[in-house]
Every structure is written in C-alpha cells, then in structure tokens.
C-alpha cells in the first residue's frame, strides 16, 4: 500500500499517518520529520533547511526531493509507505510521478485532509513536541502521560518555532499557493480521496481506515 497524506499544516496528517502506518505495518515517511532530524544532527543540509522551516517557508524542492527519494530506498519501504507532507509542490509531485513510473510502482491513493482553517490555529498553537524527536502531543487534545514531559525520554516538551501564530499564517499561505493545487493534480489522476479531518482523533482515524479499505 502506497499512500500520500495531503493537507494543510495541523490537519492531522502526522498523527494519523503514524497510527495507520503502525496498523498496516508500513513506515510513515514525513519530510518534516526528516528535515528536523537533519537540523538536530547539525548537517549542512539541516542548517540550510532550518532557515526556511523556522520562517514557515517551504524548503527548496531539490533538497526535499533528494531526502525523500533516498529514504524510499530503505528496505522497510518495500511493502509500501505513507508519504506525510510530501509532495508539497507541483514540481515535487511531478518528480515523484516520474520516479514511480521508472520503477513501475503506483500510488494507491491520496488522502486529502479537509478542514476549516480556524481549527488549524487551535491545533498548532497547542502542539508540544519532544526536543529529541520522540513524538508530539497537544495541551488539550492529545496529552502526554505527565503534563509537559515526553512519554518516552521524559524531556520537557517544547513548542516548534513554526507553531507561533505569525509563522502559522506564513505556512498557511504557502499551503494555499503551492500545495493546494496538488488536489487538482491528483484529482485528474483519479487518486484523490477527501476525508473530513475536523472531528476527534478516533473519528478521523475511522474515516481514513474506511477510505483506505476501499482502495484496490
Ligand atoms: P511538517 O512537519 O510536515 O509540518 P506541516 O505540514 O506544517 O504539518 P504539521 O506537522 O504542522 O501538521 P500535521 O497535519 O502533521 O498535523 P499533526 O498530526 O501534527 O513540515 C514542517 C516544515 O518543514 C515546513 O513548513 C517546511 O518548511 C518543511 N517541509 C516539510 N516538508 C516539505 C516539503 N515537502 N517541501 C518543502 N518543505 C517542506 O497535528 C497537529 C496538532 O493537532 C497535534 O498537536 C495533534 O495532537 C493535534 N491533532 C491532530 N489531529 C487532531 C484531531 N482530530 N483533533 C484534535 N487535535 C488533533
């Protein structure tokens, strides 16, 4: 099963991709997570990417494309994967399409997270993440076992630099300008499957499972 999760920042792509990936036993491949790991690792790529990420802007296509194509070569991707946050521009989508055609593999479906922008702001400003990359929670909707601390390494949780309101607005602008047009791209390929992403976590998960269950 090869899926793409497409949606605005805060729509729940990461949360749902982790859950569904665990159930289907396929990895969630998040370009945001890969980039944040590069930032934590202090590589040149990480330093370059950080400038864009902290500002809420998209990282240049060539950087992201290479990162994800390399990740897809790893053995755990043989049975499939969920692409979370990639592709995010028309160029990225076209390169992915070409790479899949060359390997004679196909995308089974593109799950499009449909959600009102007002909900996104509440979700993103309330998100808290582990500084060591062990996961993310929400101060109200998805709380850790001990308030303010990572369930796994017990480090104090922090707010992402791009989860401040002014940066969220920049990210939403980037989504509208560069990513939303992908709905038409995948709609034309008859791969787009919209899901309502506004409800509670479990309700959204059920709708995604039903939608994915209908993919052949
Ligand atoms: P990335 O990390 O991908 O950020 P994003 O797309 O902005 O997505 P988010 O992680 O903010 O939201 P999400 O939809 O995954 O929601 P989540 O499940 O976390 O990218 C960060 C940056 O990296 C980009 O801005 C860019 O600079 C760069 N980048 C990444 N990919 C790139 C690419 N392809 N090209 C160029 N640049 C790229 O949920 C959010 C919060 O809401 C959580 O706290 C969660 O607990 C809560 N929540 C989730 N679902 C629900 C629910 N149903 N009810 C209540 N709360 C919920």
Image (cartoon, rainbow, N blue to C red):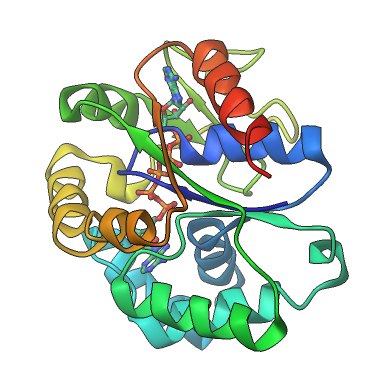
Going by the image, does 195 lie left or right of 179?
right
Mark count: 0
Give whichever of 187, 68 is nearer the camera. 187
Which corner quadrant holds the C terminus? top right
Residue 165 appears at what percent x and percent y?
16, 38
Going by the image, does 21 lie left or right of 10?
right
**Residue 155 visible (yes or no):** no
Residue 70 appears at what percent x and percent y?
67, 81
Give whichever of 162, 17 is nearer the camera. 17
Q: Check the image and report above or below for 154 versus 93.
A: above
Residue appearing at x 46%, y 83% in the figure: 95
**Residue 132 visible (yes or no):** yes
Give whichever of 63, 135 is nearer the camera. 63
Residue appearing at x 64%, y 67% in the figure: 106
Q: Check the image and report above or below for 13 versus 83.
A: above
Residue appearing at x 68%, y 31% in the figure: 213
Give whichever of 70, 6 is nearer the camera. 6
Residue appearing at x 46%, y 77% in the figure: 64
Q: Quadrant of residue 71?
A: bottom right
Q: Quadrant of residue 91?
A: bottom left
Residue 171 appears at what percent x and percent y?
21, 52
Q: Check the image and report above or below for 41 versus 127.
A: below
Going by the image, does 161 lie left or right of 104?
left
Residue 92 appears at what percent x and percent y?
40, 76
Where ligand 1 lies, by quadrant? Answer: top left
């Amino acid at each position: 099963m090869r899926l793409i999760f497409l949606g605005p920042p805060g729509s729940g792509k990461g949360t749902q991709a982790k859950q569904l990936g665990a159930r289907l036993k396929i990895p969630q491949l998040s370009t945001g997570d890969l980039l944040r790991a590069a930032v934590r690792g202090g590589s040149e790529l990480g330093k370059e990417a950080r400038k864009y990420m902290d500002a809420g802007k998209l990282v240049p296509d060539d950087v992201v494309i290479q990162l994800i194509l390399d990740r897809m070569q790893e053995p755990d991707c043989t049975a499939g994967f969920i692409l979370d946050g990639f592709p995010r521009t028309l160029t990225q989508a076209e390169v992915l399409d070409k790479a899949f055609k060359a390997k004679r593999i196909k995308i089974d479906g593109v799950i499009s997270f449909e959600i009102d922008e007002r909900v996104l702001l509440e979700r993103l400003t309330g998100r808290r993440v582990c500084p060591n990359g062990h996961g993310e929670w929400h101060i109200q909707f998805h709380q850790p076992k001990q308030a303010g601390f990572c369930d796994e390494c017990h480090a104090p949780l922090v707010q992402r630099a791009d989860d401040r309101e002014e940066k969220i607005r920049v990210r939403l602008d980037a989504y509208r300008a560069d990513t939303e047009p992908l709905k038409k791209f995948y709609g034309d390929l008859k791969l787009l499957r919209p899901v309502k992403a506004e409800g509670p976590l479990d309700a959204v998960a059920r709708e995604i499972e039903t939608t994915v269950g209908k993919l052949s």
